[in-house]
């Protein structure tokens, strides 16, 4: 397993060094988003996730060649690339809510031929498992895309989840799943330097969709479904809160959180979300909200480790 570490360093280095260049490219192309939780809503370059995907895929491809990785490993990388491209396209021509459900599910179908074990925790599901794979892939991509909106939130939460999957894979001796999760963690950690509060760059759907696209296959092919479900619980909770309070909607249709004097307040008619659960208790600063969500994800990872060690 230690064989993966040099490639993790490469993933970190490529992402860290490439991000400033991607920021300049984004500004030249007009990929600029508004930081709605700052006074005056300043512009911030978007699509920085291109650096994350580049760092992750470059290191992952080299590791795959060096380790003699199997077909399911390369199917995972292809799925990440396609989902990242979908996220990039979404920035150019905004996808509808239905398209964000359909296209990831179709990409998830590519994983099905490489599924060898259709059981979960000893229970054989057969064809039902194969049907569930594209649906689970679609959910994972959208869930990691939805838990977003604050500086460092999606990248930091994704890094914690990735590290959790990596540790669980290590405990179960699933080397390829360990490699996928660890290389993703390294890329996200490098990007977090630029994306933490106050963010100098936003990841965009390129990265937020790709986080789920990488972790879900690592969980499936590593037979880590139970622990993976626990790690994804904060994402599921956030998605359920949004669906129950507002139904299926795009990010642009959400009512932004109100900022007054540097403190965040829940809008009166706004939808619910995991961060807004904390904001309903009392107004908080943006770093405080992000830290609380990170702590929730840390708790989920710790619980998953207890399950793995049972």
Image (cartoon, rainbow, N blue to C red):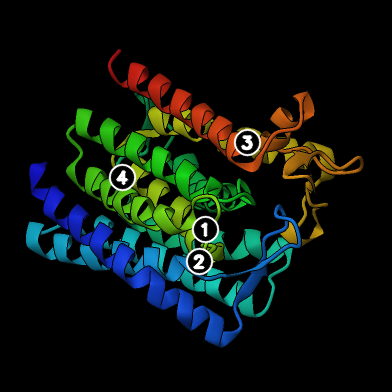
| Label 4 secondary element | helix
| Label 1 secondary element | helix
The earlier-in-sequence mark between 4 and 3 is: 4
Q: Nearer the viewer, residue 254 or 247?
A: 254
Q: Nearer the viewer, mark 4 or mark 1?
A: 1
- The C terminus appears in which quarter of the rendering? top left
**Mark 2 = which residue?**
206
**Mark 4 = which residue?**
221
The earlier-in-sequence mark between 3 and 2 is: 2
Inter-mark Cα distance, 4 to 1: 19 Å
Left or right of residue 265, residue 24 in this image: left
Residue 265 sits above or below residue 33 on the image:
above
User: x, y (%) of residue 130?
Assistant: 45, 47
Inter-mark Cα distance, 1 to 2: 6 Å
Q: Is residue 63 visible?
A: yes
**Mark 3 = which residue?**
289
Q: Nearer the viewer, mark 1 or mark 3?
A: 3
> Residue at (55%, 46%) from the top-left corner?
153
Residue 254 sits above or below residue 296 on the image:
below
**Mark 1 = which residue?**
209
User: x, y (%) of residue 103?
Assistant: 58, 66
- Which mark, by number, is residue 143? none
> Residue at (9%, 42%) from the top-left corner?
2
Q: Nearer the viewer, residue 225 or 27?
A: 27
Q: Residues within 10 Å of mark 3 (few under 14, many from 20)?
A: many
Inter-mark Cα distance, 3 to 2: 24 Å
User: x, y (%) of residue 244?
Assistant: 79, 36
**Marks 1,2: beta carbons within 8 A:** yes
Left or right of residue 209, residue 74 in this image: left
Inter-mark Cα distance, 1 to 3: 22 Å
The earlier-in-sequence mark between 2 and 4 is: 2
């Amino acid at each position: 397993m230690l064989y993966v570490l040099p490639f993790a360093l490469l993933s970190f280095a490529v992402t860290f060094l490439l991000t400033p260049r991607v920021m300049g490219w984004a500004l030249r192309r007009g990929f600029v988003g508004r930081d709605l939780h700052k006074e005056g809503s300043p512009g911030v370059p978007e699509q920085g996730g291109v650096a994350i995907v580049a760092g992750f895929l470059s290191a992952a491809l080299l590791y795959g060649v060096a380790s003699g990785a199997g077909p399911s490993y390369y199917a995972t990388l292809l799925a990440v690339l396609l989902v990242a491209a979908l996220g990039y396209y979404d920035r150019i021509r905004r996808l509808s809510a239905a398209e964000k459900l359909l296209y990831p599910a179709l990409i998830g179908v590519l994983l099905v031929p490489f599924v060898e074990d259709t059981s979960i925790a000893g229970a054989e599901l057969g064809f039902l498992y194969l049907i569930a794979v594209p649906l689970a892939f679609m959910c994972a991509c959208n869930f990691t895309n939805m838990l977003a909106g604050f500086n460092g939130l999606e990248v930091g939460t994704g890094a914690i989840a990735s590290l959790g999957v990596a540790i669980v894979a290590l405990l179960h001796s699933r080397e390829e799943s360990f490699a996928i999760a660890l290389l993703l963690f390294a890329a996200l950690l490098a990007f977090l330097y630029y994306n933490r509060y106050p963010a100098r760059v936003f990841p965009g759907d390129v990265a937020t969709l790709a986080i789920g696209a990488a972790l879900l296959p690592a969980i499936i092919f590593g037979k880590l479904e139970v622990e993976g479900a626990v790690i994804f619980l904060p994402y599921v909770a956030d998605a359920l809160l949004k669906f129950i309070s507002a139904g299926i909607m795009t990010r642009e249709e959400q009512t932004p959180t109100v900022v007054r004097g540097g403190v965040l307040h829940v809008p009166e008619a706004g939808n619910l979300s995991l961060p807004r659960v904390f904001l309903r208790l009392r107004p908080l600063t943006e770093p405080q909200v992000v830290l609380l969500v990170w702590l929730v994800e840390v708790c989920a990872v710790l619980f998953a480790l207890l399950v793995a060690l049972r």
